Image: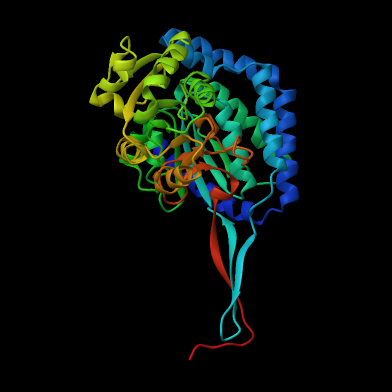
Amino acid sequence: MTIAEKIRKIAADARQASLAMARLSSGVKNDLLLNMALALINNAPHLVEENRKDLEAGEKKGLSAAMLDRLMLDEARIRGMAEALREVANLPDPVGEVTKMWKRPNELMVGKMRIPLGVIGIVYEARPNVTADAAALCLKSGNAVILRGGSEAIYSNVAIGRLLREEMEKAGIPVAALTVIPFVEREGVLELLKQEEMIDLIIPRGGESLIRFVVEHSKIPVIKHYKGVCHIFVDASADFAMAERIIANAKTQRPGVCNALETLLIHKDVAETFVPRIYEALATLKVELRGDETFRQFAPAARAATEEDWHAEYLELILAARVVDDLDEAIAHINKYGSLHTEAIITADYGNAQRFIREVNSSTVLVNASTRFADGNQLGLGAEIGISTTKLHSFGPMGLEDLTTTKFIVYGDGQVRT
């Protein structure tokens, strides 16, 4: 079979398997995930050995230390993968939930009920844990899933997928509901993105270039998340100690992730006092500040910001900073330069907090908290399949509920339309 033929068969088999997945009870799905978690633990030495092949190949290719770290599996990370499966098993099952019900004048009872999306394709880069996480979320929500990881993690991903499918086979669940594509040719991705009759949704996870490639070539709806240009606005009423703590956490705890702070906005009324304070605090943490003219009046050692800095997702210890006249200017800046990801305000003014929440056009908006909380697990979803900055069909961190849709259900007693 050619690569295109293999992909078409994988997609067709997944479509058929999705019908069986939609019928599974919560108990069967939960038992499956718990058995999958145990299989990962019991086969940790094998997974580490397969992962070593990926690491050796990555070193030969000259992958960065950061990339190799994301790629690496050890027993602790495998335990973490297993624990994530257990957490998903413990989450409420959204499938079959009736979200609302109402009566029409003709006595018809009309409602909406959650159902799986069907078949989900996920295209992702280096991290092997995504294989287990994505499989768990898709299967728990009653979907079939096709996983295409990056070439740098092929041995790890295939090994994880094989273990998970073995547990499905033992439980009598169609293994075609979970496929890790075992070849790395780009032709496979391109063919996958053409299967609009078999696949309902594509979710890309990785850098901006991967997501733009998927969007450009897909005939299937795509959940997009290009980048995270996240902002914090320090209002005139902000508590400085709180603001400093939150900003430092948002920028430096993990600077290479999409919910890390990239632009800091400061109200002009507190700039003279707060700018030197936050500059010194961040400089101590090895953060490079790039400020506008007003910011640099109070922190002369900061580099001059350019127009490109307001658009930048640095993913490193660099932070753009600007002094704004008021809340209106802060909101206008965010809505112009933001990426619809995550924004926060530090304020003691309830009215300003409420305006910020209503008027900032992003998928997660926080008051007096770090942008690093824009994460499905941190927000109580248990786990996430990704973060959507597309308003259709989901917006923000996507959990189990976001891997379902709703259909109308109608109960009658002989009614006919006149």
175 to the left or right of 190 = right
Question: Residue at left 44%, top 18%?
Answer: 278
Lateral position of residue 89 relative to residue 237, left or right: right
Residue 178, compared with residue 41, is above or below; it is below
Residue at x 53% of width, y 24% of height: 127
Q: Kindly indicate the quadrant of the structure image that contains residue 41.
A: top right
Residue lying at 65% horizontally and 36% vertically, measured from the top left: 165
Residue 198 x %, y %: 46, 51
* Residue 366 image position (x, y, % from top left): 50, 38
Q: Is residue 184 left or right of residue 36?
A: left
Res 365 seen here: yes
Dividing the picture into quarters, in which one does residue 315 lie? Answer: top left
Q: Nearer the viewer, residue 150 or 239?
A: 239
Quadrant housing the N terminus: top left
The residue that appears at 53% across and 52% down in the rendered structure is 118
Can residue 169 be spotted in the picture?
Answer: no
Q: Give residue 34's position: percent from left, percent from top.
A: 74, 37
The count of marks equals 0
**Rendering coords of residue 239 (x, y %):** 51, 28
Please name whichever residue, 47 or 244, is drawn nearer the observer in this view of the structure. Answer: 244
Colouring chosen for the image of the structure: rainbow
Q: Which sits in the foreground, 175 or 371?
A: 371
* Quadrant of the rendered image containing residue 37: top right
Q: Is residue 210 left or right of residue 15?
A: left
